[in-house]
Image (spheres, rainbow, N blue to C red):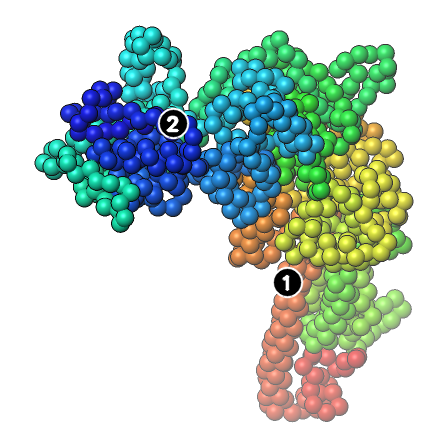
């Protein structure tokens, strides 16, 4: 300890005035450091000090804290905070453990190197390792505190070479400022921080002195007016944190002794210094009062709010979080014990903040994939961006036009989209080029996924898509011999046959039963007398013929005479009118609509059968979707796919499409809907998409974390969508250039309000990939619905009329037949009553004139009984 200001009630020191008290420096001599610490503390205690201010290191901390605790002398220090409880030690430096852990979680680091100084970093390192064990972080801890100063440059270079081989791209430095500068100088080829800020590394750190605070501004203003000869370091715009904590410590001591005077507590050590080496040790009786006064101090200092807990440690403090930008260090947020990590708006770049891009060519990485990016036929004769064409090529041009930058298209070297190696944890593909600084932006069919969102930023989706089903297009169904029966369901045809028979039988019965249906035969040529026989034209065969003629809409030589018979005929004619009209209308629809029978219509159809095999790409997001899905249908499909023999997985999309085409309808391929729709428009035009999408996701434009391009690209995508250019581009490359005629498809882009990789957004992505969002919707929309199960969304097609469509006309027919039978009964009763009256009158007349009755023929009787039909004989 080189310098220790000591506060006492006497002496001649006049360094700081504490309202009547004075401070006096005490210097440590070279030699046995621990012994010198003991001598210095004892000498100051023997002189009658009230409190001691100073620094400690890992070697002296135990000695100083032990002596102060035993002798009841308060020790105020800006050194690193210690673990545990140390009575009579007032620690001015805030603890950074909570802020550091929050920052690691904010950046979502799961693998990093931790370089620490053994003098101060062990406590923080232990907290980091504890969190790493809980959250499965991979931490490489390296002690840089014991490096020889003579070989430090070589050691630091070797250290970073080793980290480079291990692909450690994230480093935490927990060292003093001088050592940090040495490590930065050797660890980065760009040299010091002034060079790093213009590219090469993202640097973040903590700051306890807020230069925007009015108290700090006033101090800097007063500091700049002092003479530099008398006060070395004056006229500087910044101060070291140790200097700020020293200034605050003096304020704390001043405030504490002022409060003791206000409370009229007499404190004096004159003639009562004591011997610190006495056995047993004799503590200072009033030391407890001074410790209590120091811990009760609450003031505003250069390091913010100063307040202590019962153990003498800082509480209720705020630490600023800084990042090195192109214009210097910049505050992006703060950390406090109450609010934890708080990111302020100053962290977010302006949506149009593309300064610095005017003179820079943005490197755009993409991938060769039809129809997104393709080589032109004459690409060998062209240069630069003119060699390429496709959806993403046009999109890149529109984005550059709206954002105002020049760009260069480059094809990703390994031909991959981007995945992280399970062993090395290294990203490949376009994602890797963004993560490791080889490209500035990726414009390609890059799916927004959870793992990618953790390392790069995505724009709003420029295209919405989902997993879809591709099958071989079924052949047009050939009309059968009896296809003319298709417009009506088979149960209707059966009912028509029974209705025909029933109407014929009823017509026969009512004709037999109704007296008005009987009539005598007309005079025939050559006959002199009228026939006495009564006839009925509606025998069983004539009834069948009448009904058939009416059904075929043809004429008939006979027709009913009685009211009941005519009722039967009327309702049968009405029935025939409705049936024939419905049949004709539906037949016309069947003849004009092209019918192709698809074996499956949805994922549910696939899961319920095993005749048609189905599979996905062997490695990709589609396979991962089924593997992680918690929806019963998709889980059942995954169980089938992983156990199917031979394997239903394919290595490439081209292989999957070829398998669909060669399988004669016995294989279905699951792939992204955009590619499915594109292949459907390519020759030989023998594939088709069936059913809806199984999930919902989107393609986004990717940028590195924290890139200033991100917000500008977001606004450009939204503007292009509002102008309809995204739909126009899709129609151009999918359908206008299609080889199978005009196509449809839902090409509408609906970019969701997807933002950056915050925990909430990452959670939403994870739930979407697991199918939980779809499961929740099905639960609350359909499973708990009150109107029955939802329609599977099958395509509209012409279907045969069912019995329910024409049930009413059958009801009318049955009612009409019942009415006819009732009328026939009424006719019979009425006629019987009339004939009975007539016979009674005739009998009375015969009794009055018996002679005439003997000569007259009896028309009322026939054999035995009488005939109600009023004729001599009835021909049955």
Cα distance between the residues tagged 1 and 2: 121 Å
Q: Is residue 482 above or below residue 494?
A: above
Residue 262 rendering spot, x and y as whole percentages: 11, 33
Secondary structure under the numbered disc 2 in the rendered image = loop
Badge 1 density bin: few <14, some 14–19, many ≥20, Cα 10 Å: some
Q: Is residue 41 visible?
A: yes
- In which quadrant of the rendered view does residue 496 lie? bottom right
Quick one: 425 or 26, which is closer to the camera?
26
Badge 2 density bin: few <14, some 14–19, many ≥20, Cα 10 Å: some
Quick one: 524 or 672, which is closer to the camera?
672
| Residue 870 marker | none
For the N terminus, the image quarter is: top left
Horizontal side of 26 relative to 354 (left or right) equals left
In the rendered image, which residue does mark 2 sit on? 29
Name the residue at 15% across, 25% down.
Answer: 20
Quick one: 676 or 225, which is closer to the camera?
225
The mark that comes first in sequence, 1 or 2, is 2
For the C terminus, the image quarter is: bottom right
- In which quadrant of the rendered view does residue 49 lie? top left
Disc 1 or disc 2, which is closer to the eye?
A: 2
In the rendered image, which residue does mark 1 sit on? 812
């Amino acid at each position: 300890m080189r310098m220790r200001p000591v506060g006492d009630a006497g002496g001649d020191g006049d360094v700081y005035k504490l309202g009547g008290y004075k401070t006096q420096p005490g210097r440590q001599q070279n030699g046995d450091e621990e012994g010198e610490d003991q001598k210095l503390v004892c000498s100051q205690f023997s002189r009658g000090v009230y409190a001691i201010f100073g620094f400690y290191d890992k070697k002296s901390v135990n000695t100083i804290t032990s002596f102060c605790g035993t002798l009841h002398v308060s020790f105020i220090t800006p050194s690193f905070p210690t673990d545990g409880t140390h009575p009579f030690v007032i620690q001015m430096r805030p603890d950074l453990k909570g802020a550091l852990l929050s920052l690691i979680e904010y950046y979502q680091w799961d693998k990093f190197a931790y370089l620490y100084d053994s003098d101060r970093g062990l406590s923080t390192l232990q907290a980091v390792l504890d969190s790493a064990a809980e959250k499965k972080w991979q931490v490489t801890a390296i002690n840089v505190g014991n490096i020889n100063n003579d070989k430090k440059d070589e050691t630091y270079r070797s250290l970073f070479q080793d980290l480079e081989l291990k692909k450690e791209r994230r480093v935490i430095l927990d060292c003093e400022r001088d050592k940090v500068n040495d490590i930065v100088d050797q660890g980065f080829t760009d040299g010091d921080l002034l060079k790093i800020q213009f590219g090469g590394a993202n640097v973040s750190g903590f700051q306890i002195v807020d230069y925007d605070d009015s108290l700090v501004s006033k101090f800097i203003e007063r500091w700049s007016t002092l003479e530099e000869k008398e006060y070395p370091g004056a006229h500087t715009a910044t101060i070291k944190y140790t200097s700020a904590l020293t200034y605050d410590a003096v304020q704390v001591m001043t405030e504490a002794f002022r409060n003791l005077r206000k409370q009229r507590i007499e404190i004096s050590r004159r003639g009562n210094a004591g011997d610190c080496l006495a056995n047993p040790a004799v503590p200072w009786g009033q030391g407890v009062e001074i410790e209590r006064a120091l811990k009760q101090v609450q003031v505003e200092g250069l390091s913010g709010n100063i307040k202590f807990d019962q153990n003498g440690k800082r509480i209720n403090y705020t630490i600023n979080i800084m990042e090195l930008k192109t214009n210097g260090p910049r505050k992006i947020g703060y950390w406090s014990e109450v609010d934890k990590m708080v990111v302020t708006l100053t962290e977010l770049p302006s949506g149009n903040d593309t300064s610095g891009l005017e003179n820079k060519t943005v490197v755009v990485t993409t991938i060769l994939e039809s129809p997104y990016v393709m080589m032109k036929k004459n690409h060998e004769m062209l240069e630069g961006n003119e060699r390429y064409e496709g959806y993403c090529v046009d999109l890149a041009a529109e984005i550059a036009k709206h954002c105002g930058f020049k760009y260069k298209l480059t094809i990703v070297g390994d031909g991959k989209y981007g995945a992280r190696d399970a062993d090395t944890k290294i990203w490949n593909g376009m994602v890797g080029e963004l993560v490791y600084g080889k490209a500035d932006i990726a414009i390609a069919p890059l799916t927004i996924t959870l793992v990618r969102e953790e390392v790069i930023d995505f724009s709003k989706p420029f295209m919405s898509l989902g997993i879809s089903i591709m099958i071989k297009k079924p052949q047009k169904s050939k009309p059968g011999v009896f296809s003319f029966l298709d417009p009506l369901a088979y149960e209707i045809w059966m009912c028509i046959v029974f209705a025909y028979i029933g109407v014929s039988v009823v017509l026969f019965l009512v004709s037999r039963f109704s007296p008005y249906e009987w009539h005598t035969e007309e005079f025939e040529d050559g006959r002199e007398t009228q026939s006495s026989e009564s006839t009925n034209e509606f025998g069983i065969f004539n009834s069948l013929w009448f009904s058939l003629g009416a059904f075929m809409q043809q004429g008939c030589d006979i027709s009913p005479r009685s009211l009941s018979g005519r009722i039967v005929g009327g309702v049968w004619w009405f029935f025939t009118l409705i049936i024939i009209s419905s049949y004709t209308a539906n037949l016309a629809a069947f003849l004009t609509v092209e019918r192709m029978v698809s074996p499956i219509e949805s994922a549910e159809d696939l899961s319920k059968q095993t005749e048609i095999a189905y599979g996905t790409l062997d490695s990709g997001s589609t396979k991962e979707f089924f593997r992680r899905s918690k929806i019963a249908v998709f889980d059942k499909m995954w169980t089938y796919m992983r156990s199917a023999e031979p394997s239903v997985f394919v290595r490439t999309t081209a292989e999957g499409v070829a398998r669909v085409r060669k399988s004669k309808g016995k294989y279905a391929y699951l792939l992204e809907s955009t590619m499915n729709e594109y292949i459907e428009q390519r020759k030989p035009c023998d594939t088709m998409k069936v059913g809806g999408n199984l999930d919902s996701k989107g393609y986004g434009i990717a940028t590195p974390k924290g890139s200033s391009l991100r917000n500008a690209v977001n606004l450009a995508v939204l503007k292009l969508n509002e102008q309809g250019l995204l739909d126009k581009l899709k129609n151009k490359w999918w359908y206008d250039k299609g080889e199978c005629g005009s196509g449809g498809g839902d090409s509408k882009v609906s970019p969701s309000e997807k933002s950056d990789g915050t925990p909430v957004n990452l959670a939403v992505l994870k739930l979407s990939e697991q199918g939980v969002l779809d499961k929740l919707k099905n639960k609350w929309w359909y499973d708990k619905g009150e109107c029955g199960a939802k329609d599977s969304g099958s395509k509209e097609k012409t279907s045969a009329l069912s019995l329910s469509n024409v049930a009413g006309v059958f009801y009318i027919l049955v009612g009409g037949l019942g009415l006819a039978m009732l009328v026939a009964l009424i006719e019979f009763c009425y006629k019987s009553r009339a004939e009975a009256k007539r016979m009674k009158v005739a009998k009375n007349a015969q009794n009055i004139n018996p002679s005439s009755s003997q000569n007259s023929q009896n028309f009322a009787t026939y054999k035995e009984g009488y005939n109600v039909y009023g004729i001599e004989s009835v021909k049955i």
